[in-house]
Amino acid sequence: MKGNRIASICAYASLAISVVMMLLWGCNVGGFTVVSLDSFVGVIVALLAIVVTFAIAWQIYNVMEIRNKVEQLNQLEDRLIKQEKSLEQMNYNAEHEINSLLCFGAYKDKAYLASFRFALESLNNGMKLESPRNIDTLLELMENITKSMTSETKDEYGQFDLIMKIDKEIKSHSNYDFIKVRYEETLNVLTSKVKRHEKKQ
């Protein structure tokens, strides 16, 4: 690592300076014959100042390194969030398409209540997209499904409860107001035509 390499260089440099100073002192280079208290304290203070300066510089360097790492982590987090959102949108779009196909298949088989549920699920996922898809088409399809239903349509497989569950989710969307009137009229027609089994006590 780059930080470890710099720390090693500083340690070796300090060791080399210490050895040189000891040799100079031992060989009496420069006339170090008398060491007074004032000169000793001065040398100690100077050395401490140098050490503190290096320590502060090292801390500043570490702070800059940490800041760079934090910025890199933030960038990585942003990319992950964007990727997660993109995958989520792809999933909504796939569910939208699949339920549309299931809706047409059930409608062809005259399983109108199931067809309505699939249309509702497709509408729900279409509204979750950043650019909602096929909203008017699905509303028109739901209207046609209710027109094809008789007033004695039986809820044999609990489809109505599933429809009500999806209905709550659709009504929680922020853009629900744009479809509210038309949607609720269609849902009311459906409700009036479905004959539900009474639950046994």
Image (tube, rainbow, N blue to C red):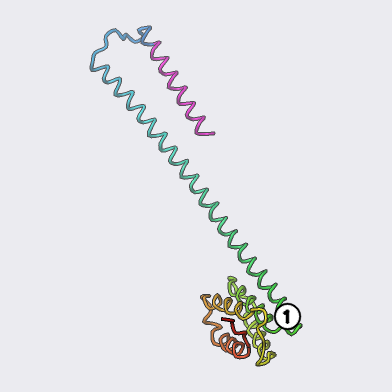
Q: Which secondary structure class fits the magenta region best?
A: helix
On whether residue 178 falls in the magenta region, the answer is no
Locate residue 179, reporting x and y percent: 56, 83
Q: Residue at x 70, y 72 (%)?
A: 98
Image quadrant in which the N terminus is located: top right
User: Measured along the vertical axis of the image, is residue 96 above or below residue 68?
Assistant: below
Which residue appears farthest toward the bottom when viewing the image?
151
Quadrant of residue 192 within the rendered picture: bottom right
Q: Residue at x 38, y 11 (%)?
A: 24
User: Measured along the vertical axis of the image, is residue 107 above or below residue 34?
Assistant: below
Locate residue 2, reporting x and y percent: 53, 34
In screen coordinates, is 146 left or right of 40?
A: right
User: Measured along the vertical axis of the image, is residue 86 above or below residue 3?
Assistant: below
Q: Which amino acid type is shown beneath numbered disc 1?
A: Ala
| Residue under numbered circle 1 | 106
Q: Secondary structure at mark 1?
A: helix
Q: Where does the magenta region start and end?
A: 1-23
Which residue appears farthest toward the front when viewing the image?
201
Nearer the observer, 131 or 156: 156
Q: Residue at x 59, y 75 (%)?
A: 127
Which residue appears farthest toward the right when viewing the image?
109
In screen coordinates, is 25 left or right of 165?
A: left
Quadrant of residue 183 within the rendered picture: bottom right
User: Measured along the vertical axis of the image, is residue 51 above or below residue 171?
Assistant: above
Mark 1 nearby-residue class (10 Å; few <14, some 14–19, many ≥20): some
Nearer the observer, 170 or 6: 170
Image quadrant in which the C terminus is located: bottom right
Locate residue 187, reporting x and y percent: 59, 86
Locate residue 171, reporting x and y percent: 53, 78
Quadrant of residue 161 within the rendered picture: bottom right
Nearer the observer, 195 or 93: 195
